Image (cartoon, rainbow, N blue to C red):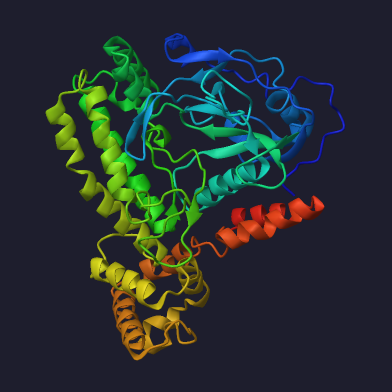
Amino acid sequence: MTIAATPKNQNFPNPLLTLNYEPALEALGDDYYDEVAAAEFPKHILRFRNDQLLPLLGLNPEAVTDDHFIQAFGKFEERRPFLALRYHGYQFGEYNPFLGDGRGFLYGQVRGTDGELYDFGTKGSGRTPYSRGGDGSLTLKGGVREVLAGEMLHQMGVRTSRCLSMIETGQSLWRGDEPSPTRSSVMIRFSRSHIRFGTFERLLYIGRKDLTQKLLDHVIEQYYPTLQGKADKYALFYAELVQRVAELVAQWMAAGFCHAVLNTDNMSITGESFDYGPYAFIPTYNPQFTAAYFDYYGRYSYENQPGICRLNLEMLHPPLAAIIPSADMEAALANFEAHYLLSYQQFMLNKLGFDRLEIPEADKLIYLTIQLLNDTQVGYHEFFAELRQQFSSNWREDADLIFSGASIVQSSEQVDLLNNWRKLYHRVLNSLSPEEMDKVEAMLRRNPKTVILRPVIEAIWEPIVQDDNWQPFYDLLNRIKSNN
């Protein structure tokens, strides 16, 4: 079960409220945020608590009750201030100066046991000065989807935010053309930072070079500490950000993930994946796959993600130009493609069972794999799950044994393509040392058996809507976490 049992002894302080909260961003001053109040909700039903994250906060999950979560992250008791962050952004290529935290705020920042600074950010916690006509709320289904996104991507090795908790709030929300109201929730996002590309874009828009410098120094101090004290730390920061973003989008592409809304206000300055809306995992290899129904022209399609992330990095040049020489940023951005291709190759080879880039014909193997997935339209995730389940050391002896029971080909051309793939995979296996061969099965076990395609999400949502039955949701989470 995801919801932990409540300890009998409840006569002790709430561990979530006695954490050592650091005013790291708050100390920069209110040029970057507005203090806001949390909404009051008619009900508080804890639907998800992420016990896996509590040890990172120095907490024993058994010492944290469900009521502790509700008190801290549903009723929002005993903590202030709550900070609605200010930012702008390019949305579908158009600059929007009317943005900011419209249905959330920075709840607090805590240093993990790993020494890193983490944010607790809310979503669905009520109206702020940036709600702009919105109600500041989060649908229950939106909360469920974000919980699933964070846990799935984390298990797949993607650098991602995760949900710390999700509470159903008892509000009825009207959305779009829905004939009846839907249920609501409030969640806590656990991430490295909520500072966005759009945070810096706003500072350029209002002409505050001084605030840009101050914020950039903060970002380097907290999230790029190895650059502290270096004469060229600002240029090195941007170069590292380019590399982090390139690696992140390579992780998405290998994971078969389409973020759907890669506006600059949804890009983290730490190079972490966050802010999940109408995302989707691709069912089959389809470069034109587009997750958001409102992305009419496929701007944020699966295949466009690397190019869009590079463009968003380029859009940071004007906001940062007062601090970082443009020539330095251009030189760093020129390395984006090399960083991306190297990372994508690494992640795809891992999915194929190999942990090093120097294997013979690595590029050709990845190319043939993508061609096979594209031409056969076998399920993208099923292919790698099947590779994990069928793999045998006997494949090294005879190429015909590889995928011998597979029914993924339907035409003579596809048969030829599969045979070519088998022969190449066989050659690669035979190029490995005995020690490397022993690692193949372990690498393949990283490929999940369960991936949250849209029908999977709908299958667990239906029991929630019809019968308030959350067990399929918890069962799915357990399968994701156990990689089954």
Please identify the residue farthest to the left as the structure is shown: 327
Residue 53, image x and y in percent?
Answer: 60, 37
Q: Is 300 located above or below residue 88 in the figure?
A: below
Locate residue 430, reporting x and y percent: 31, 77
Percent of width and height locating residue 277: 52, 43
**In this orientation, which residue lies closer to the viewer: 231 or 304?**
304
| Towards the viewer: 380 or 280 | 280
Residue 336 occupies which quadrant of the picture?
Answer: top left
Q: Is residue 21 above or below residue 253?
A: above
* Quarter of the C terminus within the rendering: bottom right
**Residue at 35% over, 84% down:** 414
Which quadrant of the structure image shows residue 399? Answer: bottom left
Q: Position of residue 480 (x, y in %)?
A: 60, 56
Q: Would residue 376 be seen by someone viewing this image from the given angle?
A: yes
| Quarter of the image where one finds residue 35 | top right
Establish if 311 lies above or below 286.
Answer: above
**Count of marks overlaid on the render:** 0
Q: Is 389 positioned to the left or the right of 335 in the image? A: right
Q: Residue at x 44, y 48 (%)?
A: 260
| In this picture, residue 93 sits left or right of residue 125 | left
Q: Residue at x 37, y 49 (%)?
A: 300
> Left or right: 256 with respect to 184?
left
Question: Does the rendering let one see residue 398?
Answer: no
